[in-house]
Amino acid sequence: MTTRWLTPEEQRAWRAYIAASRLLEDAIDRQLQQEGGMPHLFYSVLANLSDAPDRRLRMTDLAETLKITRSRLTYAVTRLERDGLVRRENCRRDKRSSLAVLTDAGMAVLERTAPGHVETVRASLFDRLTAEQVGQLEEICTGIARGLQGEDAESGADDVPWRRRSPCSPPPPPSS
Amino acid sequence: MTTRWLTPEEQRAWRAYIAASRLLEDAIDRQLQQEGGMPHLFYSVLANLSDAPDRRLRMTDLAETLKITRSRLTYAVTRLERDGLVRRENCRRDKRSSLAVLTDAGMAVLERTAPGHVETVRASLFDRLTAEQVGQLEEICTGIARGLQGEDAESGADDVPWRRRSPCSPPPPPSS
DNA sequence: ACGTCTTGGTTCAACTTTTAAACAAACCTA
DNA sequence: TAGGTTTGTTTAAAAGTTGAACCAAGACGT
């Protein structure tokens, strides 16, 4: 089969995407590193914990929503634990699992850092987008994500009755 | 000033973007690593060289289009040079600069690897987008990139008369 | 010319992150 | 209970990144 090369439009879109994502990630990382002393991934861990049911999440679940390997998450959490921002706890239900719990210190750091982070996200991204484009971006990205998700998690129905999805964080969500 | 938190729509878009970009970069990297033995960044170096005027580019220019530091590029090129895919050359015009040149071996690797890469890009991204969305994506990304560009390169006019921008590569472009 | 400033690029060492394979403990299922 | 699976960690090696220091070569002003 002769390769289906990218059309000129696709070329342009692809290159633009590469550049934008590289620049964006750099900007986010730089800001978070300066003002929070941590890379984006670590911040995401905190953020996700902060609006999880009980400020705690199973390692595997967290890894899954963050789209990273368990190993990578172990590293991140260990690091965060060392700094006292996260604590590990055992799961009563399943003694294999451990839960990552956001500590008060972690919450504090998050609250201190979130405004700057959000500001950066705004300045870099949303302030340059029309409301319409925000919608378009979401649609595009969810499509892509869904597509790439399924490839390894090739299961049909992902029913996990005991995994609650409920409201929880009264204070404003620090994005991710 | 009280933080302008993200609206729910922005939240969703942002989370979707994070997930998608993480998954996408992973997919691309995995494929390139397996079939080409190199990370995406390295491939980008080769690709950019391949459709540059004389299959050669000044380090600084290359770094700039790749949006990475010169230091980082030095590392990448050194690595690629070690594998014989790229060679360094001195610039006649300016004895300070060195040019990265794509070798025949490098071109060969690129040609061997490009189809798989493009296929991955298609499968992960473009096959899930309508023509309209491709346009939207480009527009969004160029906007973002332009915005983030200017911040450090705060110069007004970027006129460099002697930097030609001409056609060159007859074979199909291996995307980036 | 001369001294100074800027640019282009590399080097180096410290560090952080990532990967992959190997494990052990806890579950599950028949 | 045997056999397989899931969860999470450990470990060692490799890779990549950063940032400062540095040198050489242009540019500029006088």
Image: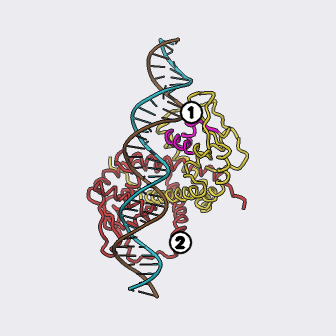
Chain colours: A red, B yellow, C brown, D cyan
Q: What element carries label 1?
A: loop
Give the amino acid type for the residue marked by disc 1 in the picture.
Answer: Asp
Write the residue at 53% across / 41% down.
Answer: B73
Which residue corresponds to mark 2?
A: A154
- Number of marks drawn: 2
Looking at this view, is A133 or C10 the one in front? C10
Q: Between marks 2 and 1, how big is the CA–CA gap?
A: 49 Å
Write the residue at 70% across / 58% down.
Answer: A3
The quadrant holding residue B157 is top right
Q: Is mark 2 on a helix, strand or loop?
A: loop
The quadrant holding residue A175 is bottom left
Which residue corresponds to mark 1?
A: B158
Q: Which chain carries label 2?
A: A
Write the residue at 33% across / 56% down.
Answer: A80
Report x, y in % for residue B40. 56, 51
Q: Inspect this view and state whether residue A155 appears.
A: yes
The answer to whether residue B173 is magenta is no
Q: Mark 1 lies on which chain?
A: B
Q: Where are the magenta residues, as a range? A: B56-79
